Amino acid sequence: MSAPASPSVLPPSVLVTGAAKRLGREIALTLAANGWRVAVHYRDSVEEARQTVADCARLTPGAQGFRTNLGNETAVRNLLPAVIEAFGQVDAVVHCASTFEHDTAATFSFAAMEKHMRSNAGAAILISQALHTHIAGRQTAQPDARGVVVNLLDQKLWNQTPDFVSYTLSKAALDAANSMLALALQPLVRVVGVAPVMGQHKPLLMGETLAERSASLPNHQSTDLDTKAAVLLALQEGSISGTTLLVEEEVPQAKPQAPAPAAGPLAPFVQPTRRHGRR
């Protein structure tokens, strides 16, 4: 009987929240196409998540789905341990999931703000905390182990409008949290923001130049990569932390789904269990 594979030779593993559809699915497929085992987080989009898991697994085997309500603190605290149990280890988190509900200054309420803050900022902070604990626990066996968190922000932070007040406030909180987390979790975990913007920022650094100067990046750095490529860059380039990559792209109104890879064998799909908290 052959010996089990060592964790050091496994493909890197990433948890992508909100990965069932739209941009989260696009990012999950991009990472799978580049050799990452993807943990597909979702809440209510069961069939879309099942398809994303299967499509990711055709690109890099081992993808699985995990259902969690990111507004529930207990469920959030259980999410990364569940992925670690299934995958053996986790190397990165990409936080795409967000609550996005309309309100204005006239309709704003504490309840609306809290709902957005829980899933859009609080969940990202707790999952970052859990990844740091996991990476620290691997230091004895894997002293070179490092992690990275990529949090998706929103162009509304750089293009203010008077609507979606609670949503925008939650993304502003996440932007601030990125800087604080990058300081608190170093050197074991890097924290990077990625935000698509509407073309009002010119690219300043690209390719090798960006890699060479990334250690001294200002807090918000423009690039002409698309969002998926920017996330991949943030995961791969070990000197980028504590900054937000502003991605120059026209955000499509229709948000089309990513094309599926060629058909192949389906991957195992993890059904929700009580350990993920209440639904």
Image (cartoon, rainbow, N blue to C red):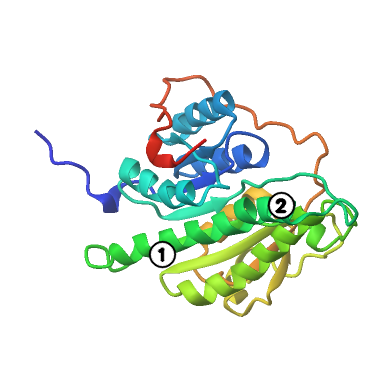
Q: Position of residue 21 (x, y in %)?
A: 63, 34
Q: Can you say whether 77 is above or below 42 in the image?
A: below
Give the distance between the C-alpha atoms of the residues marked 1 and 2, in whole angstroms: 30 Å
Disc 1 element? helix
Residue 160 visible at all: yes
N-term-proximal mark, 1 vs 2: 2
Q: Give the number of the disc on residue 166.
A: none
Q: Which amino acid type is marked by label 2? A: Ala
Q: Which amino acid type is marked by label 1? A: His
Give whichever of 40, 11 is nearer the camera: 40
Which residue is denoted by mark 2 in the rendering?
111
Write down the quadrant of residue 123 in the picture. Answer: bottom right
Q: Position of residue 145 (x, y in %)?
A: 34, 64
Which residue is denoted by mark 1 in the rendering?
132
Residue 246 visible at all: no
Q: Residue at x 13, y 41 (%)?
A: 3
Q: Residue at x 61, y 51 (%)?
A: 119
Disc 2 element? helix
Write down the quadrant of residue 170 in the picture. Answer: bottom right
Write down the quadrant of residue 87 in the picture. Answer: top left
